[in-house]
Amino acid sequence: QAGDLADEMGLRAYLVGGFVRDLLLGSGHFDIDLVVEGDGIRFAQECGRRLSLKVVAHGHFGTATLHGLEGFKADIASARKEIYEKPAALPCVSKGGIKDDLFRRDFTINAMAIGINRHCYGEIFDFYGGRRDLESKTIRAMHPLSFIDDPTRILRAVRFEKRFSFRLESRTLLWIRQALARRMLFCVQKHRLRDELILIFKERRPVPVLKRLWGLCGYSFISPGLVYREGWNAAHTRMQKAACWFAAHAAHKRSLDTYVMLMCLFFEGLALRRLKETMLAFAFRKGESRRVLSYRKDAAVLERRLAKQDLRPSEAYRLLEPLAYEVVVLVYALSAKKRVKDRIRDYLVVHHGTRLHVRGEDLAFLGFRPGPHFKKILMAILYAKVDGKLEGKNEELALAKK
Ligand code: ATP
């Protein structure tokens, strides 16, 4: 339908980027990327109107996103040409054709397009040898200055290399090394590095990417003091297993941000002050920083306390309740102590789902005035219930009266 519309509007439209790459690889890619020779936003608006999809336009970038049912998403952009006037700075953008638009991309395997207009429907536009590189499993940059123009491509190169088990073409590797020798990773805006780091943390197998990056340039461009640890791979496997277990068994069915769990591990070695500075400098999201800092501060103490012999379930509850699930599950995954694991399991599977019969209105009925002490009373009842001391509403009410 989008192709018909492009024909009607006298525009040429193409599927591009990762969608084409993954289609040729035969793997799934759910986000659709379209490029239009002409006004991409007008095309997106017309598409949205005809197909009843929500359109969010980003006028400044000449792009728009269509949102549909079940998370369907399509990005539409106007074909453009980019010229980098300064290393690592944002490029000057002007209108261009599909060939220009593909040339501005990171690697040949991401620089192919598929026509959707009637006259070229399904035709692959491969000006730069992307198909050949896909077949020979090669990551090849488009030109020698690619990593000087945009050093974040170094992170993208290793991410794709490890994701697909490809290899970096020798000149591409040389160009990466040249950019690294010029310390280009220190020149990029930190939030752009953050976005690429998050994409690495979100990979299905992120640790080989981190290892490759460590081998190429270390992590000092993120923070001095960060080091690669051999144990990450095994830890990541345990973490994934624990996350699956959590999804299946935890009383509160909420999916975990497993990438944040990996971030917790990645930043664990940093001194607290340095960690705070890094989180701030890279403008990690509040929720991400909060959980990473919490793991750094709380994990060891938590493990020690949970390992104590005579800990009541309500005491474990109180220790665990303020913490994010990602932190709790990570401690569960990595602890070697059976008692710690058992207590976290009990908390997540049984105690965290504890519900009281008594409600605020029951307390009001008993003559308590609503206020902060309501919560105190309810929590005291909850703890007693977690410890197995109460059964039924009458016992809960009796405790409230006390
Ligand atoms: P993924 O499967 O990880 O989503 P993708 O190839 O779809 O991979 P995106 O980050 O969504 O990656 O980017 C879409 C496309 O935009 C890429 O395929 C690439 O052509 C282009 N692109 C993204 N980032 C850059 C960059 N830094 N420099 C040049 N081109 C880029």
Image: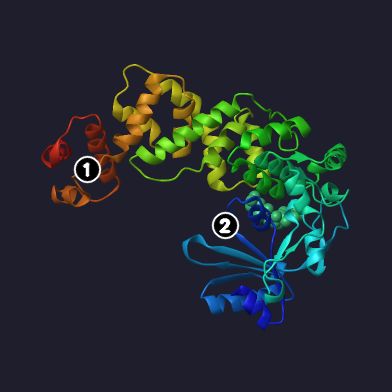
At 67% across and 54% down in the image, what residue appears?
A: 24
Residue that badge 1 annotates: 356
Mark 2 C-beta closer than 8 Å to ligand 1? no
At 76% across and 68% down in the image, what residue appears?
A: 79
SS for callout 2: loop
Residue 171 lies left or right of residue 211; in this view the side is right
Residue toward you, 56 or 301:
56
x then y, percent, for residue 232: 60, 28
x then y, percent, for residue 267: 62, 33
The mark lying in front, picked from 2 and 1, is 2
Mark found first going from the N terminus, 2 or 1 = 2
Residue 233 lies left or right of residue 21; in this view the side is left
Residue toward you, 347 or 334:
334
Confirm whether residue 324 shows in the render. no
At 58% across and 31% down in the image, what residue appears?
A: 265
> Up-down: is 329 above or below 374?
above
Residue 133 lies left or right of residue 48; in this view the side is right
